[in-house]
Amino acid sequence: MTRSIQDVARLAGVSSRTLRHYDQIGLLPPSGTGPGGLRQYDDAAVRRLQRILLLRDLGLPLTDVGRVLDEQADEAGALRRHLDQLRAEQDRLARMIATVERTMTAIEKGERLMAEDMLDGFDHTQHEQEVTERWGADAYATSDAWWRGLGPDGQKEWQARTRELGEAWGRAADSGVDPKSDEAQALAARHADWLGSIPGTPGSEHGRPTKEYVVGLAEMYVADPRFAKNYGGAEGAVFVRDALVAYAEREL
C-alpha cells in the first residue's frame, strides 16, 4: 500500500514542502511516483519517516539523522532505544505536571511549598554547558543573570517577542519571498536587534551582534532541529539562515 505525499504530510503533521526537502537531501526518497509525478510512500518509507521525526524530536541535527538511520540496520532495536528515550522524557514531563498541580493546590489552599517541590522536574540550566562551550562562562553567567533579573512578567514579555519574531519569519518563508528582499532583510535587521539586546552575547556591549555570531547562529538554525522547528522546519530555517547571512555580509 502506498500513500500520496499529501496524505503522509497530513498524518505526520509536517508540510509537503518538508517531505520534498527530505527527498532532495537524500534523507527520505519516495517509494515511487503516481499520476502527474506526485511522490508516493510505502509502509517502509513511512516507518523511516517515523524514525526521522523521532530523532529530530530527540534533538539530533538533521545533518546527522541520515547517518544514524543508515548505521542502525536493526530497525526494531533502534525503535526500542527511541522508546526508552521517549519514556524517560515522559517521566520528566509527568514530574513537571505533578509539580504544577501541587503548586496550584497550595496556592488555592493558602499553603506554602518548598522551592525544591516547586521546581521538581524543571532544569533552567539545561543549556549552560552548551552556551559555555560556544561562547564562554562569562557569556552564560551574564545572560543567565539578565534572564533571572527580568522576573516572571519580563520573561513572559520576552518570550512573546521571541514568538512573534518566529511567526513573522514563518509567514515570510511561506510567502516565497527572496531572502535578500526588503521584507526578509527588514526581518533580519529586527532579528539582529533582538540578538544584540541579550547581555553576554557577542557584540551585546555595543547593542549590535557580531557578524560571526549571527552567521554562526544562522547555520545552527538549519543544523539543529531544536532551532529549526521555531521556523517551521528545515526549509523555514534555510530561509532564515540565508536572509541573516545576507544581512550580516552587508551590515555587520
Image (cartoon, grey):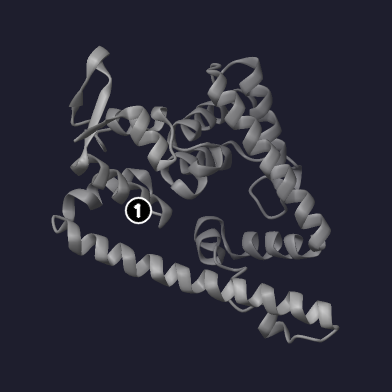
Give residue 101's quadrant in the image.
Answer: bottom right
How far across and how far down the image is residue 72, in percent?
A: 18, 56
What amino acid is labelled 1 in the image? Leu
Compared to residue 179, the image places residue 200 above or below, namely below
In the structure shown, which secondary structural element does the residue marked by tag 1 occupy? helix
Q: Residue at x 61, y 79 (%)?
A: 120
In this orientation, which residue lies closer to the viewer: 153 or 144? 153
The answer to whether 100 is drawn above or below residue 192 in the figure is below
Label 1: which residue? 55
Residue 191: image x %, image y %?
66, 35
Quadrant where the image shows the N terminus: top left
Q: Which residue is at 45% across, 68% downward?
A: 89
Q: Is residue 99 above or below residue 145?
A: below
Q: Is residue 141 visible?
A: yes
How many badges with numbers are in the image?
1
Q: Residue at x 58, y 31 (%)?
A: 170
Decide: is 170 above or below 80: above
Q: Residue furthest right?
A: 110
- Can see residue 195? no
Q: Please state the horizontal and vertical placement of residue 42, each as a whole percent of the image.
A: 20, 37
Given residues 159 and 194, the one toward you in this image is 159
> Is 145 left or right of 177, judged from the image as shown?
right
What residue is drawn where x is 73% and y is 46%? Answer: 160
Question: Most extreme residue toward the left, as rendered?
Answer: 73
Q: Where's residue 178, x and y in %?
A: 54, 16
